[in-house]
Image (spheres, helix red, strand yellow):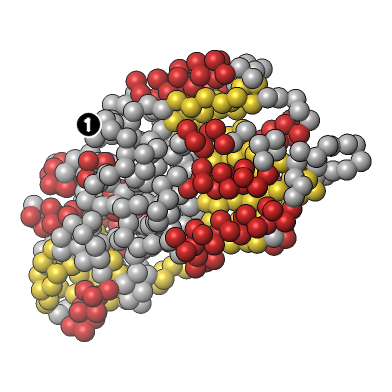
């Protein structure tokens, strides 16, 4: 480590590689997927990401206030999807290595990582990334890492890092603030004010994504206790990790990392205590999910509608297909009047467009893209309307606007009516972000007895204002809260709720 004097600013390298990998998804995540989202090398990293509301944005802004010589490596982030290709992973790692080597001598390294990234042939990606950095900078240079709280943490990762921090909120509203914390932690280490020692504790369980909100059980009470522990002056950092159950690795699941100032026993005691709080609430973390048949039958008994049937397993925002049709089958079987479902099915759209408005058609809808979202359902119905699938959002502050714009394009659409059930067929999968999605083609949301929404949480903005009741369904899908649906190979067993 080079000496820090008053005259020469500290040389701190900065970078990030972030991906939340759903290892059960068939498609791979390539370098093009990173390039389409966020991929910055060298100085472009600083100019593009300073003052951004991200974790690395907070790191950069605080580091510049310290007048450090900030040495950018690379920043790569892609949307949640399948395993990262070996080619993309190798390229990102070699860029990090060569740029770190070029910046030597270094006084510190700041990294923003996700924690749940998996690449072909690499189950402990974040530990590999930090190990490469460690090999270049040596043991004496502090490495401070900020993680997404959905990261899965290995003991090796904790050993390689000096101080590990994580977001404290889900939805992640504090990424920037934690980035600032990471830079402030680095400042303490550069001043040699602290000697970090960390402890990792993990309850033997997995949390489905639906149960990782920080305002609800089990994480809310963990954070409440963590806030008290942070008052202890010996505690440098507490990371409460929910883990990401859809990344099948030996480290999948929640974990607690407590870092103290040279108090290893204290770190272990606190980490175990917090881990126990998570495990004791494991049953609360399971949620109540009804089969589509039970859900439809319960919805039929409600006095008024619309009852919202939540299909969170086919959560389009989480990367699923949007063509799961089990709830449709249940509505047809129970002769539902004014039930509505939206299905992404370009083949069925084409078939109905060719038949024309008021044509009677019999066709298979849904269940076509992969084997994860159930079977296709054969439907006999009438084409009530067709549209170009363009609508303006009714909601003023629709957070989907950042992805879809205020004008949403679903591709060509069809309103297919089968008995009393309204099926909106779309060419492009589109989350239930706005009631205009249904209204634009003539389906009146308020007049429905039940509406299926393919989303975990995001549907609430548009549909809660009209919802008479909400029922969560246990449907097939890659974002299912029913983890027993997934063919785990690498997760540490026994683990709750699988065993
Ligand atoms: Zn996350």
Compared to residue 51, the image places residue 441 above or below, namely below
**x and y, in percent, of residue 249 in the image:** 37, 43
Residue 233 in sight from this viewpoint: yes
Image-based side of 149 in relation to 276, left or right: right
**x and y, in percent, of residue 93 in the image:** 56, 56
The structure residue drawn at horizontal position 21% and vertical position 66%, both measured from the top left corner, is 368
**x and y, in percent, of residue 120 in the image:** 40, 56
List the residue tagged with mark 1.
499
The structure residue drawn at horizontal position 50% and vertical position 15%, both measured from the top left corner, is 269
Viewport quadrant of the N terminus: top right
Secondary structure under the numbered disc 1 in the rendered image: loop
Compared to residue 373, the image places residue 134 above or below, namely above
Image-based side of 200 in relation to 53, left or right: left
The structure residue drawn at horizontal position 66% and vertical position 17%, both measured from the top left corner, is 233
Looking at the picture, tell me which residue is in the foreground, 496 or 296. 496
Residue 405 in sight from this viewpoint: no
């Amino acid at each position: 480590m080079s000496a820090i004097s008053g005259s020469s600013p500290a040389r701190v390298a900065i970078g990030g590689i972030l991906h939340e990998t759903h290892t059960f998804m068939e498609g791979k995540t390539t370098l093009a997927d990173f390039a389409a989202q966020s991929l910055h090398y060298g100085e472009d990293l600083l100019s593009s990401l300073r003052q951004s509301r991200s974790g690395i944005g907070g790191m950069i802004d605080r580091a510049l206030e310290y007048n450090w010589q900030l040495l950018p490596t690379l920043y790569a982030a892609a949307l949640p999807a399948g395993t990262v290709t070996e080619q993309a992973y190798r390229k990102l790692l070699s860029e990090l290595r060569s740029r770190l080597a070029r910046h030597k001598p270094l006084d510190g390294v700041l990294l923003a990582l996700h924690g749940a990234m998996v690449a072909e042939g690499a189950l402990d990606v974040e530990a590999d990334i930090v190990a490469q950095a460690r090999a270049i900078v040596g043991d004496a240079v502090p490495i401070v890492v900020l993680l997404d709280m959905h990261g899965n943490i290995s003991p090796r990762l904790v050993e390689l890092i000096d101080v590990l921090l994580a977001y404290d909120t889900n939805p992640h509203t504090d990424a920037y603030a934690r980035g600032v914390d990471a830079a402030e932690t680095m400042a303490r280490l550069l001043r040699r004010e602290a000697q970090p020692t960390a402890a990792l504790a993990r309850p033997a369980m997995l949390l489905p994504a639906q149960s990782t909100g920080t305002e609800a059980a089990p994480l809310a009470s963990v954070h409440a206790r963590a806030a008290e522990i942070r008052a202890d002056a010996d505690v440098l950092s507490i990371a409460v990790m929910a883990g990401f159950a859809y990344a099948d690795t030996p480290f999948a699941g929640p974990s607690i990392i407590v870092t103290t100032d040279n108090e290893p026993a204290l770190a272990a005691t606190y980490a175990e205590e917090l881990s126990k709080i998570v495990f004791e609430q494991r049953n609360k973390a399971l949620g109540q999910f009804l089969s589509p048949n039970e859900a439809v039958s319960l919805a039929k008994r409600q006095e008024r509608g619309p009852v919202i049937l939540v299909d969170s397993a086919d959560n389009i925002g989480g990367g699923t297909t949007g063509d799961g049709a089990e709830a449709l089958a249940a509505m047809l079987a129970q002769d539902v009047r004014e039930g509505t479902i939206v299905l992404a099915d370009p083949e069925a759209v084409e078939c109905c467009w060719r038949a024309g408005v008021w044509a009677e058609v019999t066709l298979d809808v849904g269940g076509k893209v992969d084997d994860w979202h159930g079977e296709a359902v054969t439907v006999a119905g009438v084409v009530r309307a067709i549209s170009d699938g363009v609508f303006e959002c009714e909601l003023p502050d629709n957070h989907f606007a950042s992805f879809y714009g205020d004008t949403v394009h679903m591709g060509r659409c069809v309103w297919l009516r089968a008995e009393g059930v309204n099926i909106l067929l779309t060419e492009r999968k589109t989350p239930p972000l706005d009631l205009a999605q249904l209204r634009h083609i003539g389906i009146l949301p308020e007049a429905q007895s039940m509406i299926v929404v393919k989303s975990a949480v995001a549907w609430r903005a548009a549909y809660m204002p009209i919802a008479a009741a909400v029922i969560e369904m246990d449907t097939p899908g890659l974002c299912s809260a029913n983890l027993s649906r997934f063919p785990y190979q690498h997760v540490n067993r026994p683990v709750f709720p699988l065993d």
